[in-house]
Each structure stands twice: as C-alpha cells, then as structure tokens.
C-alpha cells in the first residue's frame, strides 16, 4: 500500500524545498531552496528531522490533502495559518492546530492549510521526510529548470506525494517558542558591486526611499516600485555572477532583488546586495508590503551573520513538549472523571 499525502487542492504555490542545491551555479543551475530557511529548520525540528530535510513550502494559500499512511507526524512553521485536521473528505469541521506545533494525522484524515498571514511562506514538515530522490544533491524544486522536488513542479490536485515512513513514531507533540521571525525595520545592504554606475544622488534616493513589493514578485525575483534610480554609466554591463540578494536596476530605474530561483548571471548593474543575515526575513516579505534599505559595512554584516548562526544553532533548544500525543490524550480522557463539580437545582449550594 502506498504511503503518501494525496493532494486534493494544491494551494497557490506549494513546492518541495530544502536548504538548496549548492555548488552548481557555475553550470547555470540555480540554488533554489527555501525562501525562509529559518522557518524550514523550525518545522523540521518540531518533527525530529535533520535541518536539511525537504518540506513543503506553501505560499500565501495552503494545500488540502488526505493522509494515505497509517499515521504521520506533521508540523507547520513560518507564517500563521489555519491548520485543521478533519475525519474525512466529507467532514466539515475538525481539530485546529497552531503554527509552530507538531500534530498527528491518521489514514483517511484530511489536513487543510488555509491562507497565510504575517509571512509570505509557511513550511509543512513531515516526520521522516518525503521519499523523493535528490537531484544534484537536493530535493528542492527549481520550477523554471523543471528539476527536483515532485516532478520538477509545484503540486497539483491528484498528486501522491510519497512518504518515507508508513507510520508515525510514538514521540509526543512539540511546540517551538521564542523564535524571532519579525522583519527588520530596514533591510541591511552592502553597496555594490556596481554602485559606481549610479550617482551619489541615486544612491541616497535608494537608501532613503520606500519601495512597494509588486505582484510580479516570485521565487526568482522581488520586483519593487518606488523612487526611480538613474544610471550615470548606462544600464548594461558584461554579464557577471548573481548572488542571492543582489539588487539589479534595469533601464526603467526600479530595483529588482534576486531571490532563491534567480538566474546565475545577469547584465544589469547591481546597486547593492542584501546581507546574508537578512535574507530569510526578505523571503517572508509579502506582495503589497513596503520595504526600505540601510547601508552597513562588511564588518557589520559579518557580525550580524555570526549572530544569526548562533540563533539557528539554538532552534532545537526552543522545542518543548506540548503534552501527550493524540493516542495518549484519548486514553486519558476516556479513563478520567472530567466533572469537577455539580449544581443541585433544588438546593442553594455547590456540591463538590
């Protein structure tokens, strides 16, 4: 019998992602990976997986799926969303769970993940991970290259996403507290490498302005709308390498921030690059949000990176027991006296 999640509704954009396909950009292969790798690590920690285990990255609206295995331990981390487990496909209501907490579902039960808030993405991890063969060392989905993940694409209705485990372990449910997923007030950048293509006035405009995240934004690039940036040395350069977080400025003068599915080379001048410590927060930015930028030095960026790594290493320590697992809780309820008191309608007293 197949062990899988059977997709009823795929959501807006649901893809399998891990921490990325590292080491192949010189061959023109994008790194891909999670837009918010911190939340991915958190979801995996909640179900006892290794940090790089592939999970579902859910953008804006989540999927609905049926559990086709004896049982599964699941957890969502990142955005807030309505997460509900119902008894079957025809059931109307079920049990709701918060983000940042693991939960269990059984064969035939339906899991519904609703619209996200507070972040653009949510990660749904399953204990043991998905039974998917890596491509170039990663199960991350690169949609434009049609490689990795589940058949190189986002999920569609009818997909059977295979699981590595037939049944969940007996581990208790866990919650994760204390993880700071707030966006910085301004995203920190290092100028360059082609900031000489812009006047000092344009650089000041870039650092002082506010930019709206446009609907054209996707996993490849964040398109911004705000104060126009003028070039002083043309808007074409010899194509060179693109780093995650590079901010290109084409001829129209509006910045474009390159994200995880970016091209590996580009021919537009790059006014600045978002520092690595802010990249996960950048991945949480939603279409319609407004963002701005702040210049920092390389030394400051390195210190902020070290602080981030310390926070990442502390994620397992933030995982705490949420109490009994669902089987233990059911047994406890069936064997306990749940009535702590009663009122006698005929006597003006409380009977304990």
Image (cartoon, rainbow, N blue to C red):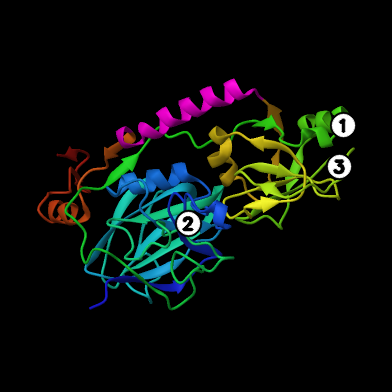
| In the foreground, 231 or 110 | 231
Provide the residue span drawn in magenta. Answer: 296-317
Q: Earlier in the sequence, mark 2 or mark 1?
A: 2
**Which image quadrant: the C terminus?**
top left
The crowd level at tag 1 (other Cα within 10 Å; few <14, some 14-19, many 20+) is: some
The crowd level at tag 3 (other Cα within 10 Å; few <14, some 14-19, many 20+) is: some
Residue 94, located in which quarter of the rendered image? bottom left
Instruction: Indicate whether 282 appears above or below 161.
Output: above
The crowd level at tag 2 (other Cα within 10 Å; few <14, some 14-19, many 20+) is: many
Mark 2 or 1, closer to the camera: 1
Q: Regarding mark 1 in the picture, which secondary structure is present there?
A: loop
Inter-mark Cα distance, 2 to 1? 39 Å
The mark found on residue 57 in the picture is: 2
- Residue 53: give x, y in percent of width and height: 35, 53
Q: Earlier in the sequence, mark 3 or mark 1?
A: 1
On the rendered structure, is 30 left or right of 134?
right
Inter-mark Cα distance, 3 to 2? 33 Å
Residue 316 sits inside the magenta stretch: yes
**Which image quadrant: the N terminus?**
bottom left
On the rendered structure, is 47 left or right of 302?
left
* Residue 48 in view of the camera: yes
> What secondary structure characterizes most of the magenta part?
helix
- Residue 257: give x, y in percent of width and height: 68, 46
Q: Residue at x 31, y 47 (%)?
A: 50
Q: Earlier in the sequence, mark 3 or mark 2?
A: 2
The mark found on residue 199 in the picture is: 1
- Residue 173: give x, y in percent of width and height: 25, 48
- Residue 90: give x, y in percent of width and height: 38, 77
Mark 3 or 1, closer to the camera: 1
To which residue does mark 3 refer? 228
């Amino acid at each position: 019998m197949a062990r899988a999640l059977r997709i009823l509704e795929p959501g807006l954009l649901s893809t399998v992602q891990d921490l990325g396909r590292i080491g192949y950009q010189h061959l023109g292969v994008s790194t891909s990976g999670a837009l918010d790798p911190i939340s991915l690590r958190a979801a995996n920690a909640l179900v006892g997986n290794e940090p790089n285990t592939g999970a579902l990255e859910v953008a804006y609206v989540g999927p609905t799926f049926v559990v086709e295995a004896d049982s599964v331990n699941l957890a969502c981390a990142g955005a807030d969303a309505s997460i509900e487990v119902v008894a079957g496909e025809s059931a109307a209501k079920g049990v709701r769970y918060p983000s940042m907490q693991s939960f269990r579902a059984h064969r035939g039960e339906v899991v519904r993940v609703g619209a996200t808030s507070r972040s653009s993405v949510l990660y749904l991890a399953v204990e043991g991970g998905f039974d998917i063969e890596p491509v170039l060392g990663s199960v991350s989905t690169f949609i434009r290259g049609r490689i990795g993940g589940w058949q190189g694409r986002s999920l569609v209705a009818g997909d059977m996403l295979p699981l590595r485990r037939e049944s969940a372990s007996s581990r208790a449910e866990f919650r994760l507290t204390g993880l700071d997923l707030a966006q910085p007030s301004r995203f920190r950048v290092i100028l360059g490498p082609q900031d000489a293509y812009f006047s000092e006035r344009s650089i000041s405009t870039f650092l002082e302005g506010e930019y709206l995240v446009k609907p054209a934004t996707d996993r490849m690039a964040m398109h911004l709308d705000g104060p126009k940036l003028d070039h002083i040395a043309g808007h074409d350069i010899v194509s060179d390498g693109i780093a995650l977080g590079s901010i290109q400025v084409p001829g129209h003068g509006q910045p474009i921030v390159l994200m995880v599915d970016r091209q590996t080379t580009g021919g537009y001048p790059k006014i600045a690059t978002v520092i690595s410590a802010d990249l996960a927060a950048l991945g949480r930015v939603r279409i319609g949000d407004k963002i701005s930028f702040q210049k920092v030095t390389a030394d400051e960026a390195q210190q902020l990176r070290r602080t981030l790594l310390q926070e990442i290493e502390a994620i397992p320590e933030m995982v705490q027991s949420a109490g009994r697992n669902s089987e233990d809780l059911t047994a406890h309820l069936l064997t306990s006296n749940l009535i702590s008191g009663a009122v006698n309608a005929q006597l003006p007293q409380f009977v304990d």
